[in-house]
């Protein structure tokens, strides 16, 4: 019996030791000293001209914890007064400083919903993450003036090098100097226009303005792409082509889409179109002179048909001479209803349609 009692006692003591070890493993993390962050400036006017230069630099003292930890750090930005709701965080590495360029900070402001070209009141702080716990520094108040970003730099794109490109104002078979297809949704789906002057012109699809990873037709000419063993895609006729590419799914489509203006604001009314002509020097489509009245309306359509139209987004829009506006392509499901354009002053106009970026089609009318 004594022997059994001795064995039970030793086992009980062992359990106590194990229990104590587990309690030590579950020590509670506490912040002993809060982080403190500062910046080299509190007012920042952003510029695309120096987009790669540092716009602001942050320096901080890390928080101190009661136990040794391996934290991660971010500089967190938010609109002032929102308590960092919908904030944007930027990786701050493991050091004690972080510089952010004009382009990077402008992208952050864009994501926050800050208004470009005016001052915005912004707050910033250091966010330290330890496991699932978050610890915050003091808050810095900033005044930031973002710029309206160049949509050619904002949206992902692929390139369309080919034998047609030189005549369109670019360079033949040069990915870095060819028309682009953009991804307005910033995914693997690209779309856009190319202009072809000669039948049976050939082209391929490239990415990152280089030949590495380029794709062409799989040889069946049924809209399937290959990266290895591919052949060139062909444009059977001269004209403007509207192209869509799903880069991940390796598919593409291409249709002819030659545009003109139509409406009772034009000399030929709703009965016929006045066609645009491509200008390789400006890379825009142009009608050099057309009379427009103020009582009628007009829109732009492709192939003398109504399936593809450039229109305002939702309601009739009055255009002012020299002021370019964003225009929308009905076949991309970006138009509500069937709206039209009109001008505020009657007279002869030059009309320019810029479709080089499918995330930012532009229409400009200029009174002559």
Image (cartoon, helix red, strand yellow):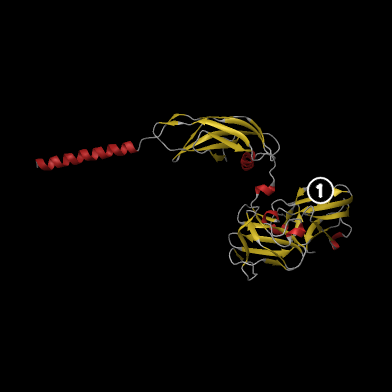
Residue 5 visible, this orientation: yes
Q: Give left or right: position of 115 versus 294.
A: left
Q: Quadrant of the N terminus?
A: top left
Q: Residue furthest left?
A: 1
How many neighbours does mark 1 have within 10 angstroms: few (below 14), some (14-19), or many (20 or more)?
some
Image point 55% across, 35% down: which residue? 98
**Towards the viewer: 114 or 183:** 183
- Residue 235 in picture, x, y percent from top left: 72, 66
**Towards the viewer: 51 or 319:** 51
Q: Give left or right: position of 227 versus 16.
A: right
- Residue 332 in picture, x, y percent from top left: 69, 57
State the residue position of label 1. Answer: 318
Image point 22% across, 40% down: which residue? 14
Specify the quadrant of the image occupied by residue 190.
Answer: bottom right
Q: Is residue 77 above or below residue 353?
A: above
Specify the quadrant of the image occupied by residue 286.
Answer: bottom right
Local SS, label 1: strand
Q: Is residue 185 above or below residue 250?
A: above
Q: Give left or right: position of 96 versus 186.
A: left
Q: Residue furthest bottom?
A: 220
- Residue 271 in picture, x, y percent from top left: 85, 63
Q: Is residue 204 above or below residue 53?
A: below
Residue 80 visible, this orientation: no
- Residue 342 in picture, x, y percent from top left: 83, 51
Q: Is residue 149 above or below residue 97?
A: below
Total marks in image: 1
């Amino acid at each position: 019996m004594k022997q059994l009692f001795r064995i039970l006692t030793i086992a009980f003591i062992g359990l106590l030791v194990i229990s104590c070890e587990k309690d030590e493993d579950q020590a509670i993390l506490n912040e002993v000293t809060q982080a403190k962050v500062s910046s080299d400036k509190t007012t920042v006017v952003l510029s695309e001209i120096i987009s790669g230069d540092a716009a602001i630099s942050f320096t901080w003292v890390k928080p101190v914890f009661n136990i040794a930890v391996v934290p991660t750090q971010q500089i967190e930005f938010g609109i002032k007064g929102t308590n960092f709701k919908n904030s944007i965080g930027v990786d701050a590495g493991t050091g004690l400083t972080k510089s952010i360029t004009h382009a990077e900070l402008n992208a952050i402001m864009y994501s926050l919903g800050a208004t470009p070209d005016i001052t915005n009141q912004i707050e910033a702080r250091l966010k330290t993450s330890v496991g699932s716990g978050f610890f915050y520094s003091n808050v810095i108040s900033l005044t930031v003036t973002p710029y309206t970003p160049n949509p050619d730099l904002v949206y992902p794109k692929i390139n369309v090098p080919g034998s047609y490109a030189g005549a369109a104002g670019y360079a033949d078979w040069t990915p870095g100097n060819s028309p682009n297809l953009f991804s307005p949704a910033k995914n693997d789906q690209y779309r856009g226009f190319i202009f072809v002057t000669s039948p049976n012109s050939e082209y391929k699809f490239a990415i990152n303005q280089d030949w590495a990873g380029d794709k062409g037709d799989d040889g069946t000419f049924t809209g399937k792409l290959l990266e290895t063993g591919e052949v060139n895609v062909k444009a059977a006729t001269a004209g403007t082509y509207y192209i869509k590419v799903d880069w991940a799914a390796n598919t593409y489509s291409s249709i002819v889409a030659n545009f003109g203006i139509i409406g009772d604001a034009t000399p030929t009314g709703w009965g016929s179109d006045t066609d645009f002509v491509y200008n390789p020097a400006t890379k825009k489509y142009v009608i050099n002179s057309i009379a427009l009245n103020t009582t009628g309306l007009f829109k732009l359509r492709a192939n003398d048909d109504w399936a593809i139209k450039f229109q305002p987004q939702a309601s009739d829009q009055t255009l002012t001479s020299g002021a370019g506006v964003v225009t929308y392509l009905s076949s991309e499901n970006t138009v509500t209803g069937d709206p039209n354009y009109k001008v505020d002053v009657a007279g002869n106009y030059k009309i320019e349609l810029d479709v080089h970026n499918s995330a930012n089609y532009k229409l400009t009318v200029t009174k002559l």
